[in-house]
Each structure stands twice: as C-alpha cells, then as structure tokens.
Amino acid sequence: QVQLVQSGTEVKRPGASVKVSCKASGYTFTSFGISWVRQAPGQGFEWMGHINPYKSYTDYAQKFQGRLTMTADTSTTATTTFYIELTTLRSDDTAVYYCARDYDFAWGSWGQGTLVTVSS
Amino acid sequence: QTVVTQEPSLTVSPGGTVTLTCASNTGAVTSSSCPNWFQQNPGQAPRALIYRATNKHSWTPARFSGSLFGGKAALTLSGAQSEDEAEYYCLLYSGDSWVFGGGTKLTVL
C-alpha cells in the first residue's frame, strides 16, 4: 500500500505563495499519479488537479489554472515526492490540502493533510 | 458545471442497513463516472472505501459495498457498527475533472 506523507502547517500572508510536498513510498510499480484536493474549514472537498510524472501528464482544474503548479521529483529510488505551489494567495485559500493516489480512475491512499492558513 | 448531490444526513440503527446515494445534475451516474467513495472522521484525512463504483480496497470492511442503481451511485452499509459513524463523500469524474459530493453525515443510533 502506498504511503503518502505531507509537509507541515503553513501560515502565509495574502499575495504570497505556498509550496506543499507529498512524499510517496511503499509502492511496487512506478506508474501512478497523484491528485491534489483541498478542504476549506467546515466545507467539502475541491479537486485541484492531477499529475502523473511517469506519463508526463498534468491536468489542472480550470479554477486553478495560472495560479497552481504541480511537479514531482522521481530522482530518488523507492520514493517520489510530489509538490504543489499555489501563488497569489487569498484568504479563501485557507484550507487543508491533501494529496491522494489516483490511478486509472481509482483513488486510494491519502496523505495526512497540510493546513495552509492565509491571514494578514 | 457538474453538481454532485448526496443526502445531507442519514441515521442507521446498530446492525442495520443503510444506502447512501450520489447523483449528478448532468444525468445518470454510470460506470464512466468512475464513482469513488470515501469515509472521513472528524479531524482526519479521508479513507477510500470504493473505487470505480463497485470495487473495494484491501482495507475496506466487507460490510461496505458499492453499486449503480436508479441512475445514481450507491454505497450500502450492511450491519452498521458504531465506528461507522462518519461523513461519507462520493466523487465522480465528469468532463475531464473530478467533482465531490457535499457529503452525508451518517449517524449510528
């Protein structure tokens, strides 16, 4: 089973950028992708995008195009680290950001979540 | 814009059976919508239960099952236990993007 471990809590000012990481390990084949999702306080989930570095594929939700960048580092054996960077932060970007394994339309393991707070 | 609708809340008795549903405003939910179901407890990350409508993960308790019925995706819990009290979310693939339902708060009482 793939384990996903995310980076820690972030506090940012409006207008700043944030970069969140998601380290994947425990997989036996290198062909899976990751979706990024966020959950605002007390709210539901919002899909942000998907990346599969093994297929050189990224797909951004229209809402985040131009402000979100998804990348991945596959240089380390047995682990892959995925990143999202969200720019021009606003107060309504305050949320818990999750990575989740997403392969062939099947969602599996989730990271523990990263709280990003945007406040002046 | 796709909107995915779930029952806001449901109650089931311990040992009872309950079905949660997931509908789309764009039409019938089919296998091409690739429904996924998740369970979330307060303060925790979601846990995947069902993928592609009917498939269970290795960690999914046998009492959970997924189906397509009446133009909706469905999650059925048979033999509810107190630890099943949680929020449940469905996820559909629609037009090159994923859309979550608003969640169902399941109470076991």
Image (spheres, coloured by chain):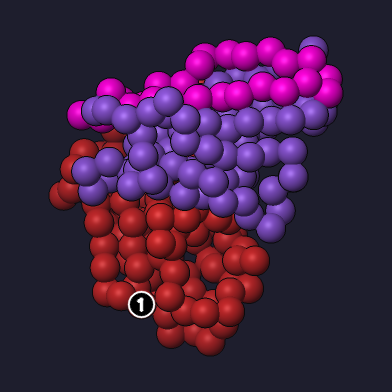
Chain colours: A red, B purple
> On the image, which quarter does residue B100 sit in?
top left
Q: Is residue B78 above or below residue A61?
A: above
Q: Is residue A71 above or below residue B68?
A: below
> Which residue is at a point 63% across and 54% down the rendered structure image?
B57
> Which residue is at a point 61% across and 45% down the rendered structure image?
B49
Where residue A113 appears, as percent x and y from the top left, is: 55, 46
> Which residue is at a point 58% across and 74% down the rendered structure image?
A27
Q: Is residue A65 magenta?
A: no
Secondary element type, mark 1: helix
Taking depth in this image into account, of A88 and A40 the one nearest to the observer is: A40
Where residue B58 appears, as percent x and y from the top left, is: 69, 58
Residue extending furthest left? A66
Quadrant the C terminus of chain A occupies:
top left
Q: Is residue B84 above or below residue A79?
A: above
Q: Main secondary structure of the magenta part?
A: strand
Taking depth in this image into account, of A63 and B92 the one nearest to the observer is: B92
Instruction: Using residue A47 as the reference point, say whether residue B60 is left or right of it.
Output: right
> Which residue is at a point 52% across and 79% down the rendered structure image?
A29
Q: Label 1 crowding class (10 Å Cα cut-off): few <14, some 14-19, many 20+?
A: few
> Does residue B3 appear in this view?
yes
Quadrant the N terminus of chain A occupies:
bottom right
Q: Which residues are drawn in magenta?
A: B1-25
Q: Is residue B17 above or below residue B47?
A: above
Name the residue type under label 1.
Answer: Tyr
**Chain identity of mark 1:** A
Where residue A51 appears, as percent x and y from the top left, is: 34, 63
Where residue B23 appears, as percent x and y from the top left, is: 39, 25
Instruction: Using residue A91 as the reference point, say whether residue A88 is left or right of it.
Output: left
| Tag 1 residue | A54
Taking depth in this image into account, of B40 and B42 the one nearest to the observer is: B40
